[in-house]
Image (cartoon, helix red, strand yellow):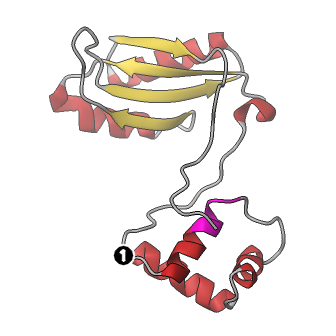
Amino acid sequence: MITDIEKKVIALLQTDIPLVQRPFREMAQKIGITEEKFLEILTDLNQRGIIRRFGATLKHQKSGFKANAMVAWKIDESRVEAVGTTMAGFDEITHCYRRDPAPGWEYNLYTMVHAADEAQCRALVERIANTVKEDDYTLLFSKKELKKTSMKYFED
């Protein structure tokens, strides 16, 4: 069960973190608790598995990465775990998921790659394919971003 104060902490974590020296103190003040209490709640939520990770979102287009592609891979199920672990080790891969194949679409492992242009994406995917010794894949290049937001579990 998640308490009301925990919901408030989670709601704050879904927003932009203040660019100040003590962001958690500023966030804590917004909901009327101390920085120490805020951090205690965060630690507890993590230990209970409610919050598993904490990270920043980078707008890749503004950082020099002009191309990205979802790569759909057809990997033998007996190798998915090992191949996925290896792929996830590439710095250029930001997402790596195993999904069930669908009728007419046999792909079961998906990665998102980022590079300066489409040619570099293709070269990177070829390098990944050579590393994992798999060559049954298709690249799905992003053409236009229609929506990109983080999930909101609780509102302020």
Along the horizontal axis of the image, is 139 left or right of 76? right
Give how far across and how far down residue 15 sits, in percent: 68, 59
Residue lying at the far right in this picture: please name it.
Answer: 20
Give how far across and how far down residue 18 sits, in percent: 79, 66
Find disc 1 in the rendering and name its residue.
48
Q: Which residue is drawn at 24% across and 18% down?
A: 102
**Is 12 located above or below residue 33 in the figure?**
above
Q: Residue at x 25, y 38 (%)?
A: 81
In the image, the segment drawn in magenta is 11-15
The N terminus lies in quadrant:
bottom left
Going by the numbered disc 1, the residue's amino acid type is Arg
Main SS of residues in magenta: helix
- Secondary element at image label 1: loop
The C terminus lies in quadrant:
bottom right
Give how far across and how far down residue 13 sits, in percent: 62, 65
Residue lying at the far left in this picture: please name it.
Answer: 78
Q: Does the magenta stretch include residue 12?
A: yes
Along the horizontal axis of the image, is 99 left or right of 31? left
Q: Which residue is drawn at 73% across and 59% down?
A: 16
Q: Which residue is drawn at 32% across and 11% down?
A: 136
Give how far across and how far down residue 82 sits, in percent: 27, 37
Q: How crowded is mark 1: few (under 14 residues within 10 Å), some or many (20 or more)?
A: few
Along the horizontal axis of the image, is 109 left or right of 112? left
Q: How many labels does the image show?
A: 1
**Is 141 located above or below residue 109 in the figure?**
above
Along the horizontal axis of the image, is 137 left or right of 121? left
Q: Does the magenta stretch include residue 96?
A: no
Frontmost residue, 67 versus 28: 28
Residue 115, quarter of picture: top right
**Is 81 located above or below residue 16 in the figure?**
above
